[in-house]
Amino acid sequence: DTLVDPNNPQPLEPISVEKPTMSIAIGVNKSPFAGKSGKLLTSRNIKDRLAKELQTNVALQVKETSDSDTIQVFGRGLLHLTVLIETMRREGFEVMIGCPQVLEQTINGQRHEPFELVDVELPEEYSGSVIDMLGMRKGQMLEMGSVSPEGIVSLQYEVPSRAMAGVKSRLMSATRGLAVMTTTFAGYRPYAGDFDKREKGNLLSTEKGTVTSHGLMKAQDRGSLFSAPGDEVYENQIVGIHQRPGDLKVNICRQKQLTNMRSAGKDDNTNVTPAVELTLEDAVEYIEEGEFVEVTPAAIRMGKPGK
């Protein structure tokens, strides 16, 4: 609707809402720690909250699935969806979310997928590693600016939206936090082909229990860990990144065997590497098909369904 002058009623052109480019499954938390910190747990709570969100969030879409405990939510990119989930988490919801899926289209009989226009500004010395990283993810360079007097170079790429998962954290690591990246929707392009999203596997907890310094010290040689001493974990929870391809189960709840010559943990605490802190966006970008993110007011965990 348009407010117009009665003497010259000329309505404005209607604004079209851009269609979603990504979807994510949001369901009831079914992990072993379900219900410990949240107060809104049921599928009815989740459906009512999403129905309320639809009244103001015009770019959001919601569809029922064959599973009554799971709802498929469609949005304008990963950030759009994770902002909603983070808001729900702070309101007291507990949910379990699956791997994000991009929404493809068939145009003139050809398979198309959404692309992002990526602009990166970074020191020239790190440009090689970033160019290599985006190239491996099927990115196409559009422009590379000249080096500024401060040693900064700008890159512009078109990258498939599905390939942007995990790029932010890898970019910060590759450039020691000195890069600035912005992304905008570029439109649909022909399907770019398959690529390896993750070169390394997971470290999975072997049992349910409390994380100990002794257990972490034994496991940290296998890769980077997400858990710290005192955290509660359960079987098949993703507790770290394996340094090699393939998943590896580790016991980070292992207790130190006490003797009259050894203390409980005096020797371990100083040798434990600090845990990698995960945000909701980091966790959703990290997971692959067959993995999930457990979102609660008190913690964000990742895991694999038990067999």
Image: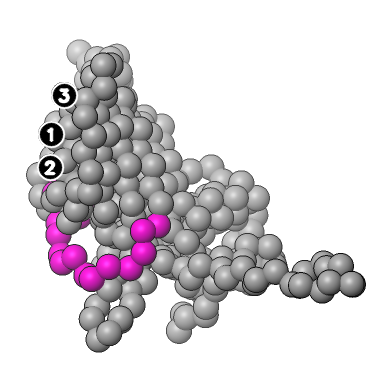
Q: How is the image coloured?
A: one colour
Give the amino acid at mark 2. Answer: Asp
Give the amino acid at mark 3. Answer: Glu
Tell me the number on the disc at residue 128: 1
Q: Are marks 3 and 1 in contact (CB under 8 Å)?
A: no
The quadrant in which residue 151 appears is top left
Residue occupied by mark 2: 132
Note whether 139 is above or below 213 in the view shown: below
* Dot 3 alpha-carbon crowd within 10 angstroms: few under 14, some 14 to 19, many 20 or more: few
Residue 106 left/right relative to 81: left
**Per the image, is 50 magenta?**
no
Q: Are marks 2 and 1 in contact (CB under 8 Å)?
A: yes
- Image location of residue 54, percent across then percent down: 64, 68
- Image location of residue 170, percent across then percent down: 25, 39
Magenta part of the protein: which range? Answer: 185-207
* Dot 1 alpha-carbon crowd within 10 angstroms: few under 14, some 14 to 19, many 20 or more: few
- Image location of residue 81, percent across then percent down: 49, 57
Give the Cα distance between marks 3 and 2.
13 Å
The N terminus: image quadrant: bottom right
Residue occupied by mark 3: 125
Q: Earlier in the sequence, mark 3 or mark 2?
A: 3
Residue 216 left/right relative to 96: left
Give the amino acid at mark 1. Answer: Gly
Note whether 147 is above or below 19 in the view shown: above
Q: Please, what secondary structure does the residue beneath circle 3 have?
A: helix
What residue appears at the point 44 percent right and 46 percent down from the top-left corner?
Answer: 280
Q: Is residue 37 visible?
A: no
In the image, 64 versus 39, the foreground residue is 64
Q: Are marks 3 and 2 in contact (CB under 8 Å)?
A: no
Give the Cα distance between marks 2 and 1.
6 Å
